[in-house]
Image: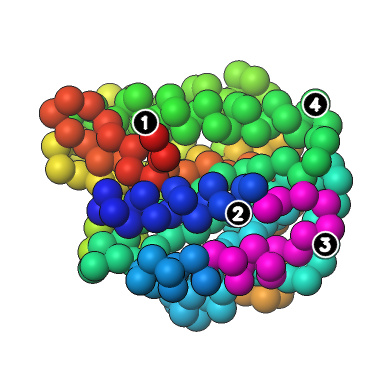
Amino acid sequence: MRTAGRMVAEVLQLLSEKIKPGVSTLELDRLAESQCEKFGAKPAFKGYGGFPYSICASPNEKVVHGFPNEEPLQEGDILSIDFGVLKDGFYGDAAVTLPVGNISNGAGSLLKFTRESLMKAIEACQVNSRLGDVSSAVQSYVEPAGYSVVREFVGHGIGSKLHEAPQIPNFGKSGSGPRLKAGMVLAIEPMINAGGPGVTILSDGWTAVTKDGQLSAHFEHTVALTENGPEILTRLD
Ligand code: MG
């Protein structure tokens, strides 16, 4: 899982270096796919439940599961990219939301709070903690800042399957839920909206967008629980 995680991190790093106004998300999708080939890894999302692409590309008011397309990215957009690989029977899964050129202060703040809420959740991934501590870490960090937590999509266990138990909501009560044990691997993925929490699915059957049209951000890491604390598998050194 460290190998798969590292590949995910390297691909996301590569894509983040390419993002600028004028680039299309379909170009990013092709780049992710060719990099997977070089790694001898399989893109985890392509064909998953019928999803047709290697990356999920969700700009601006799109929350998750957006289809890459030929539309050029515009200065001031934010772009969420979710990406996973299958390597030697194990999965890695991560997401980042990145600025396209210069973005507004409001958009920058949403990215910062969402990224930090993921780090708070990861800090809560301690042996003998409870799952609710992880969920609550996100909610209690972003809501006082005026943001809202998407309810319809959640994080998940990950291993030889992309989505395993338990589900990991980004809202909940600390001290509740199952206890965390060494050896668990969790994909933690806060999806945070600038406006209200409501989302709706577009007619393609996949793309989730905010109901109020306001911005949404998404950060994700695959995290292993060890006796020495959480180990982020999808981060470059
Ligand atoms: Mg995931």
The residue closer to the viewer here, 142 or 11, is 11
Secondary element under disc 1, as helix, strand or loop, is: helix
Pinpoint residue 151: horizontal percent, then vertical percent: 53, 46
Mark 2 or 3, which is nearer the eye?
Answer: 2
Q: Which residue is mark 4?
A: 105
Secondary element under disc 4, as helix, strand or loop, is: helix
Pinpoint residue 7: horizontal percent, then vertical percent: 39, 55
Mark 3 or 1, which is nearer the eye?
Answer: 3
Q: Is residue 236 visible?
A: yes
Pinpoint residue 173: horizontal percent, then vertical percent: 37, 28
Q: Which residue is mark 1?
A: 122
Of the image marks 2 and 3, the number of the one nearer the N terminus: 2
Dot 2 crowding, Cα within 10 Å, few <14, some 14–19, many 20+:
some
Q: Is residue 59 above or below residue 224?
A: below
Of the image marks 1 and 4, the number of the one nearer the N terminus: 4
The magenta stretch spans which residues? 18-33
Of the image marks 3 and 1, the number of the one nearer the N terminus: 3
Q: Which residue does the image show at 34% across and 37% down from the upper left?
A: 232
Q: Which residue is mark 3?
A: 72
Displayed quadrant of residue 49: bottom left
Q: Which residue does the image show at 56% across and 74% down from the upper left?
A: 53
Q: Give how far apart the Cα atoms at labels 2 and 3 are.
A: 15 Å
In contact (CB < 8 Å): disc 1 and disc 4? no
Pinpoint residue 98: horizontal percent, then vertical percent: 66, 43
Q: Give how far apart the Cα atoms at labels 3 and 1 are.
A: 34 Å
Could you tell me the amino acid type at mark 1?
Ile
